[in-house]
Image: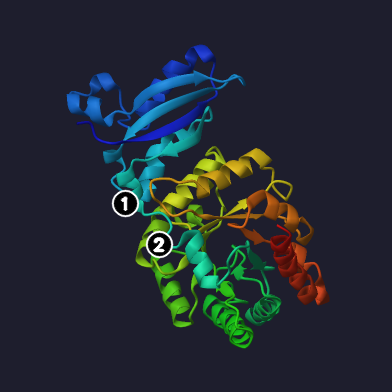
Amino acid sequence: MSSPRIDVTYRLHVAAGQAAHRARLLAVEQSIEMPPEAVGEARLLDEVLARVERVEPQADGTTLARLQLACETVCEDAGQLMNMLFGNCSLQPDVELVDIDVPDSLASAFGGPALGIDGLRRLTGVTARPLTCTALKPLGSTAQQLAGLCRTFAEAGIDIIKDDHGWANQSGSPFTERIAACQGQVQQVNEKSGRRSLYAPSLYGTQLQMQRQIGEARSLGIQALLIAPMVCGVATFNALRREHPDLAFIAHPALGGGRIAPPALLGRLFRLFGADAVIFPNHGGRFTYSTATCHDIVRCQRATWHGLRPTMPVPAGGMSVERVPELKREYGADSMLLIGGSLLVAGERLGERSRAFVEAVAADEEAA
């Protein structure tokens, strides 16, 4: 019986007449990485060499090449999966990684989200509406300034207050000081209001440093964390998720641009490696994703897939309070709406603007 394989789809930017040959070269490059005729062992050619299943010319002049990779080349390591999917060929400008599917055994090994949508709802106590989220900005602020923002946001009733992804251990706001100050303010407000707003600090550095940061966060009662899997490495991210299944991991897309299709990376792979929620640049904001791309990301995050928990989509990147009704209609209740700068521009009226955000989500829920 043949071993299970990983299904991968690539887009080839080559002339149609060259596509089949290019696909065979790609199969070699992403598996045995040497001329097949130089391989003396039949098993390697039969089981390890990637297979070209088919090539499909597209109306735009490109070709989709559908390959199968041997699971044994991945060895249940998230970084190695990325390497076998797109390691060498990421250096070849005529190739894009479009889609991926894995066998049940590999999905089970990576585990997917430990909490997912239902778990985030349990932590926040929010049912039947999107979660609200904002970000602490700008870089250069002091820990006490950020803590003041946390208090304002928590008093307004925002569900998740996360560090901006650029926060690390800056001298003006060291990690230890920042998370204690921010969590302290959120906790005080929660105790008074009865709500369960969450503060999510941004992890940075090596895996060992992140483990220490998580230990500090746990000691303060923090239950959610922000992480950028492409910055720290997907293997590090997947390892942390396995070690801390009770914590919520919100994945940031930094360094996620390039020639891996956003639905494959932010939809499938981040979910596979354990993201409970994934931030993505929504159309109509500061980035250039199309409406169709955003919908495909969300479909991959929430669709039934190898028994993995669904990931909560987080459309972001220049969203405004005025767009809340549209976002709710577009992404539904099982989403997290992230608005940052559109709140902060309110200045002294930040509390009022933040409450308007929370009320817009609630009003939209009632209207639906």
Q: Nearest the camera: 160 or 88?
A: 160
Q: Nearest the camera: 84 or 351?
A: 351
**Position in image of residue 29 (x %, y %):** 37, 29
Q: Is residue 115 above or below residue 46?
A: below
* Mark closest to the chain's N terminus, 2 or 1: 1
143 relative position to 342: left or right: left
- Real-space CA distance between mark 2 and mark 1, rounded to the nearest whole angstrom: 12 Å
Residue depicted at 48% across the width and 30% down the height: 10
Residue depicted at 57% across the width and 47% down the height: 298
**Position in image of residue 76 (x %, y %):** 30, 48
Q: Amino acid at mark 1?
A: Ala
Question: The C terminus lies in which quarter of the figure?
Answer: bottom right
Q: Could you say which quadrant of the image residue 247 lies in?
A: bottom left
Is residue 226 shown to the viewer in this render? Answer: yes
Q: Could you say which quadrant of the image residue 166 lies in?
A: bottom right
Residue 241: image tag: 2
Residue 109: image tag: 1
Crowding at dot 2, Cα within 10 Å, few <14 / some 14-19 / many 20+, comes out as many
Q: Amino acid at mark 2?
A: Arg
Residue depicted at 56% across the width and 20% down the height: 58
Residue 213: image tag: none
**Position in image of residue 251 (x %, y %):** 52, 58
Question: The N terminus lies in which quarter of the figure?
Answer: top left
**Position in image of residue 104 (x %, y %):** 33, 44
